[in-house]
Image: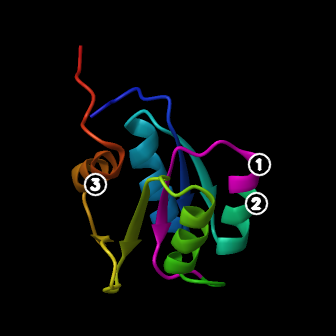
Amino acid sequence: MLCPSGLTALLVEDEQLVRDYVGHVLTQAGFHVLSADSHARALEIFLQHHIDFVVADWRLPDKNGEALLDYFQGVRPNLPFLLISGAKPNRPHLAKPFTPTELITAVWGILGPLPSLP
């Protein structure tokens, strides 16, 4: 499903295969994707670029996704944020494994209604 949005996603995932998969799905859906493999790298990217939404793994090597979510919401309270996880965090999240359709549906769920197609 291609939705040319012009929106930039910050993808934070430490597992290369998952990061590649999610990045590919988001790119194919029309999003520009900036990727990070850690909490620290995500903060660097966030400070250097305009980010429209974040997709982040719950478990990261240096801090968990909840710490990242708390930081971003402190700086930009309305920044859409989607946690993805194979664990069961106490916050809403998209459970791994997921299909491309489930991912894009979840992304548009945090962004708002799906854009109408021409």
Please give the name of the residue rendered at 59% of the width and 66% of the height, measured from the top-left corner. 74
Task: Judge whether residue 39 can be spotted in this image.
Answer: yes
Task: Quickly name the residue at label 2.
Answer: 44
Task: Quickly name the residue at label 3.
Answer: 106
Look at the image and tell me in which quarter the N terminus lies. top left
Task: Judge whether residue 14 can be spotted in this image.
Answer: no
Please give the name of the residue rendered at 76% of the width and 60% of the height, measured from the top-left corner. 44
Answer few, some or many: residues within 10 Å of disc 1's Cα (few below 14, many 20 plus, some between 14 and 19).
Answer: few
Q: What is the x, y in percent for residue 114?
A: 25, 35
Identity of the amino acid at label 1?
Answer: Gln
Instruction: Name the N-terminal-most of marks 3 and 1.
Output: 1
Does the segment drawn in magenta span residue 35? no
| Alpha carbon separation for disc pair 3 and 1 | 26 Å
| Alpha carbon separation for disc pair 3 and 2 | 25 Å
What's drawn in magenta, residue-wise?
Answer: 46-60
Identity of the amino acid at label 2?
Answer: Glu
The label number, if any, that marks residue 48 in the structure image: 1
Secondary structure, mark 2, is helix
Q: Is residue 13 above or below residue 112?
A: below
Instruction: Name the N-terminal-most of marks 3 and 2.
Output: 2
- Side of 84 where 12 appears, left or right: right
Identity of the amino acid at label 3?
Answer: Ala
Which of the two residues, 59 or 109, is positioned nearer the viewer here?
109
Does the segment drawn in magenta span residue 57? yes
Q: Are marks 3 and 1 in contact (CB under 8 Å)?
A: no
Answer few, some or many: residues within 10 Å of disc 2's Cα (few below 14, many 20 plus, some between 14 and 19).
Answer: few
Secondary structure, mark 1, is helix
- Side of 53 where 47 appears, left or right: right
Q: Are marks 1 and 2 in contact (CB under 8 Å)?
A: yes
Q: Is residue 107 above or below residue 83?
A: above
Q: What is the x, y in percent for residue 47?
A: 74, 54
